[in-house]
Image (tube, rainbow, N blue to C red):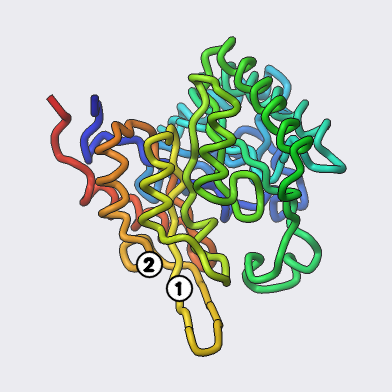
Amino acid sequence: MMTHTAETWPIAAALLQFPNVGPDGVSTQEQTAEQWAESLQEVADAGFTEVDLTDGWLRPGDLAPARLEELRATLSAVGLTAPAISAIRRSVIDPVDGDANLAYSHRTIDAAAALGVPLVSVGLHRPLTPEQQAVLWFWTVPGPQDPVGDRETWDKAVTRLRELADHAASVGVELSLEMYEDTYLGTADSSVALLTDIARENVGLNPDLGNLIRMQRPIESWESMVTKTLPHANYWHVKSYYRVEDPATGTVLTSPAPMESGFVSYRQAVKIALAHGYTGAFCVEHYGGDGLSVAASNREYLRRILPRRTAA
């Protein structure tokens, strides 16, 4: 049953544009609560009442209890609530850092519970390579890939994500799996298969279509992807891209776009999601330029296309 309206639906800003080191060289982890408030006030001033605590800015899982309380109080003071913490590039099957990422993910779940945040979004994508960091758009250079057809690694992903799910359930938190190219969450079919193998009621998909449509190679149609994945969604990172394909040469070019003018018709995608009972929060993202302002425009676009009344 739909419980939100266009005006009340939680639509959070991502913190992709906020660096994890301040102008003074001090890490966000070490900043004062007043410095956190300066950044979060920008989000509130852009018209948001929700924020995704994207850990590229601040890692709640690495804060001591007293500092978590400072963060909770700071969010309240600036008028923001957090529907989710997104743990980015912390794959639990990373061949080098998988064990450390698993421990970090457990800490992040505990931090979410302490902050009263109802959901943690995790994925299987790994840190950007030096080659990806050296170009304008990182997705134009191939990054790390999960081994295809490797049952042992697949089973390890299932086991570890199930472990996180059980921990999350024990503290009243949901888990969402962010779709991302070239991982076991890199296609609609693989994502649904992984979710099915995990088999936990508090786990759903975060069908971040942008991560897949930006690939500069042939892709499954977005209509097919949303039809397969949105029935399983419990959180949703939304962003879009322009996509140009030249069939004569096979050239594919992509660049970030506002949601209302990009490749995906989110008007149609949202209708499909709601038809399948989606009630989760949205997190609006955008790369490049004044990403926060574009995200705010994306928020207003969503409010225009979401239902004005709750379902009976």
Is 246 rendered above or below residue 207?
A: below
Query: Which residue is at 69% across, 42% downward?
Result: 28
Q: Position of residue 297 (x, y in %)?
A: 34, 58
In the image, 100: left or right of 157?
right
Name the residue carrying label 2: 262
In the image, 207: left or right of 259?
right
Q: Is any part of residue 126 visible from this angle?
A: no
State which quadrant residue 190 falls in.
top right
Name the residue carrying label 1: 243
Q: Position of residue 207 (x, y in %)?
A: 47, 45
Image marks 2 and 1: residues in contact by CB distance under 8 Å: yes
Amino acid tagged 1:
Arg
Q: Quadrant of the C terminus?
A: top left
Query: Which residue is at 38% across, 32% downward?
Result: 280
Q: Position of residue 19 (x, y in %)?
A: 65, 52
Q: How many residues crowd around disc 2 within 10 Å: few (fewer than 14), some, or many (20 or more)?
A: some
